[in-house]
Amino acid sequence: MTEPLVVVRSLVKSFGPVRAVDGLDLTVFPGEILGLLGPNGAGKTTTIRVLVTLVAPDAGQVTVAGHDVSRSPRDVRRAIGYVRQEISVDPYLSARENLWVYGRLFHIPGPTLKSRIEELLTLVELSDRANERVRQFSGGMKKRLDIACGLMHRPRLLILDEPTLGVDVQTRHRIWDYVRLLWEREGITVLLATNYLDEADRLSSRVVIVDRGKVVASGTPEALKAEVGGDVISVRLASESSGEGLLERLRAMPQVGHAFIAGGQIHIHASHSEKLIPEIMRAAADLRVAIEELAYRKPSLDEVFLQHTGRQLREG
Amino acid sequence: MTGLLIEARALTMRWFWHLKREPYNIFFTLTQPMIWLLLFGNLFERAREMPGFPSGTDYLTFMTAGVVVMTVLGNGMAGGIPLLFDRENGFLEKVLATPANRGSILLGRIFYIVAMTLAQTLLMLAVAYLMGVRVRAGLPGVGMILLISLLFTIGLAVVSLTLAFSLREHGSFFAIIGVLSLPLFFLSSALIPLNLVPNWMRAAAMLNPMTHAIDASRSLILSGWDWRLLGRAFGYIAAFDLAMFALCYRRLTRPLL
Ligand SMILES: Nc1ncnc2c1ncn2[C@@H]1O[C@H](COP(=O)(O)OP(=O)(O)OP(=O)(O)O)[C@@H](O)[C@H]1O
Ligand SMILES: [Mg+2]
């Protein structure tokens, strides 16, 4: 197996009483797009800030490209292109000037820098606005410029912290396209933090699900979803209180793999939903509980998260 | 070392690019010292009738050195302000995540402030010249005044930058800058000769590097080369600069976020 690019072992980081990261393990291999998926406050950004040497860990070992974050932070920073969760371009500079200043901080010599800037402006589709002051850019444009900055020095590892947070659908798809393009063309390794299921699902070659500072599951999106087993049926009852009785009946059925109540709904993982659905209807009728809504679908990462934490990634 | 300079130069460029897009800033940066000259020159015109005032000098000529050093003070002390914004809009964090030496943030800002201060000082001396003020020490004297301004503004900028690195709240930053600037200005020889102030004030003023910057510049304007005054000024200012750099160095070796 190839040498991993990032190794995080038993990382702990607290802010006062808050344990933002609580014994987290993470390995990123060269050439993969690793999705770090977790709800708000799971500790994704904190983990990343430790990786890019902005925050010192309380405990645990962290190495990037073979360098320890505490002992050789400069070597670590040289290996990483970091795009913050919040927009962090200089609003008083033009797009081109932003890239120039950033590139010089990596000592990229003039002529190389010039062509690199044009290349990146083309990639993020900002060439025609390159000399405008960034303050008048839209949020999506600023984000794309930030991503271009992160790619400036051709890093081995690109870290994107929620790159599509707060951008419109169109920009989101563009950003996904850039990441895929870079991955295919340059073989860049990507660590992508997100709390969007579809983003993790579609973009990552491997997903690590984190919750409350810990890893709760990891694997390829397909494998994780397969682990859920079969299809997912969710049942919303007219009155929530009567759910327990129905749940008990369902659990007794042989086709039901796993059934539980979360978010006011009964969730059922089953292998053959087409046969199970009529039986659920019958059981509900027997118990005289009214079903308000019954839905069935292939499992998504939401189910994976639900299965491991008993909560939904997103409420509602 | 060359790495540090490459980084600092890039960050200096950044400040000039900011300035380029702020025509009002350029306008007021350049006109403000002229307004000071006009105001002070006229406001205290009759001060020279006071006993003890250097005889044969008009107040404007006397005041020119004070206004120059006062502008240097204002420039230097305001030097950290943009860093407060950099911390807020994430640019600081972005720079700190690059391999760049964090000293380049300090140095880049100092280069810019020094350039601005020199331009302002030169402009003020030119305006004063048009208003009839002659520098007795001639053009080399003007060069010497520029050198004094340059050295003094560095220490002041470092104070301001250290504060900006240390304080999260804009309010606290401005409060502290205000509290530091007032005594530096009033407990100095900026407005009147020190032989006209109470003893305790004179004693305090003699510890103030600003006083020595003014006295040396003033003697170049009023009477020519006074090596004793110049030597004392360079001594005080160098000590001040070194002390401030030491403080700032300590701050930079600890986490900045
Ligand atoms: N600088 C800080 N000071 C105090 N608490 C912090 C700090 N940074 C993070 N935290 C806390 O640590 C926890 C984890 O935060 P973190 O930003 O790492 O989560 P996240 O997974 O990135 O969440 P999101 O999806 O909302 O970005 C939160 O409870 C947060 O309030
Ligand atoms: Mg985050």
Image (cartoon, helix red, strand yellow):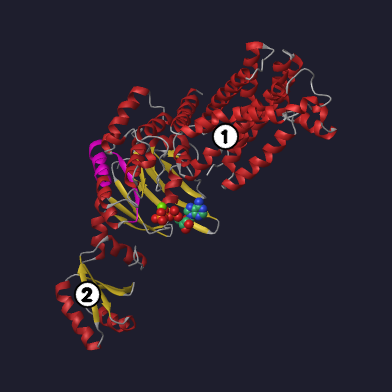
Q: Quadrant of residue A209?
A: bottom left
Q: Is B38 above or below relative to A37?
A: above
Residue closer to the observer: B55 or A25 = B55
Amino acid beneath label 2: Leu
Residue closer to the observer: B161 or A156 = B161
Q: Give the class, few, some or many, for how many residues have Cα within 10 Å of label 1's Cα (few <14, many ≥20).
A: many
Left or right of B123 in this view: B55: right
Work out how far the residue at label 2 is from the one at label 1, CA to CA, in angstroms: 64 Å
Q: Is A7 above or below relative to B42?
A: below
Left or right of A282 in this view: B92: right
Q: Give the class, few, some or many, for how many residues have Cα within 10 Å of label 2's Cα (few <14, many ≥20).
A: some
Left or right of A293 in this view: B105: right
**Chain label for disc 2:** A
Q: Residue at x 16, y 79 (%)?
A: A278
Q: Is residue A176 magenta?
A: yes
On the question of residue A204 being in view, the answer is no
Amino acid beneath label 1: Gly
Q: Is residue A237 magenta?
A: no
Provide the residue designation for mark 2: A294
Secondary structure state at the residue bearing disc 1:
loop
Image location (x, y in percent) of residue A293: 23, 76
Which residues are drawn in magenta? Answer: A175-195
| Residue B79: numbered disc | 1
Q: Residue at x 64, y 45 (%)?
A: B175
Q: Residue at x 24, y 44 (%)?
A: A177
Secondary structure state at the residue bearing disc 2:
strand
**Chain label for disc 1:** B
